[in-house]
Image (cartoon, coloured by chain):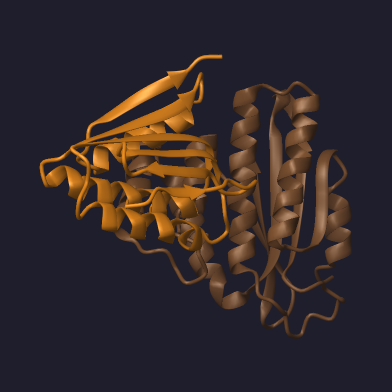
Amino acid sequence: MSFNINEYYTRISQGDVVLAFKGSITSELINEVLEAVESKLVAQNEDGKTRKKLYNVLVESLQNLYHHIEEKHEGIEENLDPKFGVLVVEKVKNGEYLVTTGNFVASVKIKFLKEKIDKINSLTREELKDMYKFILNHQKISAKGGGGLGLVDIARKTGKKMEYHFYPYNDKYVFFDLQILI
Amino acid sequence: MESLIIEGTTKTPNVNFDSEKGKLEIKGRSIPENSIDFYKPLVDWLEEYAQMPKSKTEVNVHLEYFNTSSSKCILDVFKKLETIHKNKYDVQINWFYEEDDEDMLEAGEDYESIIRVPFKMIEIVD
């Protein structure tokens, strides 16, 4: 059976959810998410270190979505908001948090994304630091505003491997999700 | 030269550049989606200041959060300061980080290893 966004969303937002959202990823939405998660974590007396790491991961992963999501997805029958993306923040075991982001990406981008994440996942702490510094010092910010540093930064700050899936959708698109443990 | 003052928002820091005293302060959060728009006035201003800098320029960077988009712009700011330093003027960058915020300390050390300007890492204890 083909991928269904509503079933997917229901499935991933069943845990101890701090925040779940599906819809347009706008600058205002990012503000609201950051504010909501921060105040929730403060209210729960979450440790400052964890709070900061989670905040940083949310900024980078949401802004990755913001910069890369296509405005419209041709051929996707479900009635999607423009710049459609999914975000779920949940509390998992051992006091850790799991951040899941999801969006439709063109199938031609699978290889690029897979290689990039696999590469980052394969690096040690020191290698990630070197990679970060190299990109910081040698690459220009793209027209979209991203610098190619977001995922490297996430990997450095969490010290964990990112997980991802590509769910086949149609000829042109797959649904890509990225899971980050903090 | 006039001073440069930019009021902070939820996504951008306060910037205060007192050109008479040669003191620049960047304080708050720097997480805008498009950081170039935000940092351009500061980088332009520094470019002008670099023509006639004070004998000593002191820079206090006190960020609670910054995103990777800002990280490149902050490097651009530091590169302007590096030019001033190269021209034999005194430049000092004070990088503030909150107690136990190792990520922020490490971010400062990343810059220190790239930019040839004296850095001081200052831990803020509550």
Q: Residue at x 66, y 48 (%)?
A: A179
Q: Nearer the viewer, residue A6 or B93?
A: B93
Q: Is residue A13 above or below residue A176?
A: above
Q: Position of residue A86 (x, y in %)?
A: 76, 58
Q: Position of residue A124 (x, y in %)?
A: 39, 38
- Chain in brown, by letter, is A
Q: How many marks?
A: 0
In which quadrant will I find the C terminus of chain B? top right
The residue positioned farthest toward the left in the image shown? B88
Q: Is residue B50 above or below residue B26?
A: below
Based on the displayed image, in which of its 4 quarters is residue B48 positioned? bottom left
Q: Position of residue A81 (x, y in %)?
A: 81, 72
Q: Colour of chain B?
A: orange
Instruction: Tell me, yes or no, if residue A164 can be seen here.
Output: no
Q: Is residue B97 above or below residue B79?
A: above
Q: Residue at x 80, y 68 (%)?
A: A3
Q: Nearer the viewer, residue A166 or A142?
A: A142
Q: Position of residue B29 (x, y in %)?
A: 56, 42
Q: Residue at x 85, y 47 (%)?
A: A13
Based on the displayed image, in which of its 4 quarters is residue B108 positioned? top left
Instruction: Tell me, yes or no, if residue B54 can be seen here.
Output: yes
Q: Nearer the viewer, residue B112 or B55?
A: B55
Q: Is residue A45 above or below residue B57?
A: above
Q: State left or right for residue B51 relative to residue A88.
A: left
